[in-house]
Image (cartoon, rainbow, N blue to C red):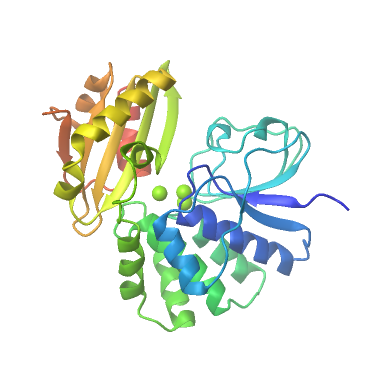
Amino acid sequence: MKEKVLIFGHKNPDTDSICSSIVREILDKKNGWEDTKAVRLGNINKETQYVLNYLGIEAPELIESVEEGQEVILVDHNEFGQSVEGIGKAKILSVTDHHRIANFETVEPLYYNAKPYGCTSTILFEEFKTHNHKIDKKEAILMASAIISDTLLLKSPTTTKYDIKALEELEKIVGIDIKEYGLEMLKAGTDLDDFTAEELVNLDAKSLDKNGVKFVIAQVNTVSIPEVLKRQEELETAIKNEIDKNGLNIFVLAITDILNSNSEIIALGDKVEIVEKGFNTKLENNRAFLKGVVSRKKQLLPNIDKKL
Ligand code: MG
Ligand code: MG
Ligand code: MG
């Protein structure tokens, strides 16, 4: 039997990566692409687990690496550094993504659907429309959850009018109060109690490398920044370990208050002055409060990036 085409989002999968993989598989099958299968590259976080429990569905299977020549479909990422082990020798058939395109290259032509929207699922929502497929309740919950997660209930500056429109339509299909559902879902993701400090700093971490500066921006969502800061000491130890282990110059952990849309960052490393310059702030006790900052993609990353 022919190997299945594997569909997956990025490492440290978030709700968009998981939900969009599942929806991508459904959509591909509707379009006659039968041999596709959603998989995942890491543990399911508590927010995503809330969605899977709500729908009573299983998480996609976990994979660690792919063989040379494996056919794959990427969602919610394109950079090889964020993808599966062995991606450089896989055959990428299609990409659906809402990130910058970087460190990405293929040998053969491919389908590539990139839109600067707030969420991959908003792009998938439009694909349903383009192909005249009806969206059922399960599909609507999956896409709505991804949009709520990536845009923090449409409050993140990454939110576009397309995300707003998609969520409005999806809310009608699911027939529930999407704000209420979304808040419960986001809150489920802020239960950080049984994570070790090491797990916390790796939960949602993206590593980047620019002009010889290696840095990581990690993010955790919370409903109480002071609650997370009670663990500052052990978080710093975990961050220092990551810096030593991976030869990093900067590690930023953003603790994001999803109710008030602010973040407190903890920043360590031998080049933290870049972070200070980027946000025009001084770190005190390795920390800084960033008012109105919630988005890694639109706020954290570009402000650091421009000083590199
Ligand atoms: Mg993502
Ligand atoms: Mg996304
Ligand atoms: Mg995210």
Q: Is residue 111 visible?
A: no
Residue 144 on image: x %, y %: 45, 68
Residue 148 on image: x %, y %: 39, 63
Residue 179 on image: x %, y %: 32, 73
Question: Would you place residue 149 above or below residue 167 in this image?
Answer: above
Q: State the image quarter where residue 241 is shown.
A: top left
Question: Would you place residue 87 above or below residue 98 in this image?
Answer: above
Q: Is residue 231 visible?
A: yes
Instruction: Identify which residue is drawn at 32% across, 69% down.
Output: 184
Residue 1 on image: x %, y %: 88, 53
- Would residue 48 be found to the left or right of residue 40 on screen? left
Instruction: Identify which residue is drawn at 63% across, 45% down.
Output: 63
Between 131 and 140, the one nearer to me in the picture: 140
- Would residue 291 be found to the left or right of residue 84 on screen? left
Q: State the image quarter where residue 49 is shown.
A: bottom left
Question: Would you place residue 77 above or below residue 302 in this image?
Answer: below
